Image (cartoon, helix red, strand yellow):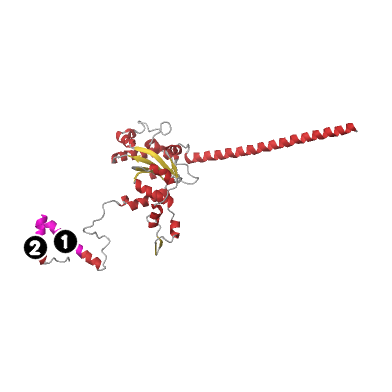
Amino acid sequence: MAPRISRTFSPCLRQLRRDSGLPQKSWALALRSISTSGQQSAAVSAGVRPPIDYTHPTKPPSARPVETRKSQLIRTYTSLLRTTPLILFFQHSNLTAIEWAAVRRELKKALLQVPPPNAAPGAEPLDITPLVQLQVLRTNMLSVAMKIVEFYNPEVAASSVNTPRTSRGPVIHDLSEAAYEAVKNIDVPADSSFAQIEPLLVGPLAALVLPAVSPAHVAAALSVLAPVPGQFPAPTRKKSPGFHDPICQNGLAKLLLVGGRIEDKIFDKAGVNWVGGIQGGMDGLRAQLVGILQGAGLGITNALEGNGKSLWLALEGRKIQLEEENKAVDGEQKVEQ
């Protein structure tokens, strides 16, 4: 039961109610919240913890979604950078929700037309199309996450005597003080991946995330998000009328491909187009590599064989020359005798 208010304060409360102009019901609710708050504070001071689902009357829970908080964003981005081999970055400019929906719809439609890659004998082909996502990023949080992924080493932090420790061990997660100190005032090397991509991290960013390096999926995505005539042609009106819808075209006009991060390497727009233009996907790239190695092996073999033949011919020519000289000397000796 809530504590009663002393009669001594009743005239003061009546005067406060008149001055506030609140109706009787609202005034009663306000008095009840004050009483409940006092009771909870007394319980906490006495060592009694409130229940887990308790909500403070004057401090309601945050209305901001958990996924938009800074700490959660850093955790999400560091995990994304460590586990995703291919990320394409786009600058966007005030796309509406309808425009985003239209762009994602056409992107999904283009990706569904990519055939699944050839699987190993006895295994089912893995289709990554459902896992491809186009998501909006927070540029500042992404920059911090990239620094943590590249320049923070938890093993080094765990061996440092300055790292805070608990009963479970050193505190070395991505949001720890050790990670903050490691990237706070770091002198970024000019040849690092972060130094190469930092000029691209300007303004609002969106990322096309692929869980595997698939040139075929990259080519399909670029044909919608960043078409290149002759290399990644845009869908025709007959084949994809939704692509030519004004809402979708307005959204695509506000997207600009600026670069990508592929296998921990930074690529500009031309490099991304080169990856998307690999014929035959990864199998085609492996075939090209095998052809290059075979060609190099044949060249080395021919070079060694050519040098061996030249050496043999030189020795044979010298042998014949010495034999002729010996014959001439023997003939002269016979003549003199």
Residue found farthest to the right:
337
Q: Position of residue 201 (x, y in %)?
A: 37, 43
Disc tally is 2
Residue 12 is inside the magenta segment: no
Q: Which residue is mark 2?
A: 11
- The answer to whether any part of residue 182 appears in the image is yes
Name the N-terminal-most of marks 1 and 2.
2
Image quadrant holding the N terminus, namely bottom left
Task: Say what amino acid the circle numbered 2 marks.
Answer: Pro
Range covered by the magenta-colored residues: 14-38
Q: Position of residue 165 (x, y in %)?
A: 40, 62
Q: Position of residue 7 (x, y in %)?
A: 10, 66
Q: Position of residue 52 (x, y in %)?
A: 28, 61
The majority secondary structure of the magenta stretch comes to: helix
Report if the CB atoms under discs 1 and 2 are less than 8 Å apart: no
Q: Residue at x 85, y 34 (%)?
A: 330
Task: Say what amino acid the circle numbered 1 marks.
Answer: Arg
Q: Residue at x 18, y 60 (%)?
A: 33
Residue 166 falls in which quadrant of the image? bottom left
Q: Which residue is mark 1?
A: 32
As drawn, is 84 to the left or to the right of 69?
A: right
Q: Residue at x 47, y 39 (%)?
A: 281
Q: Nearer the viewer, residue 288 or 79?
A: 79
Q: Nearer the viewer, residue 109 or 281?
A: 281
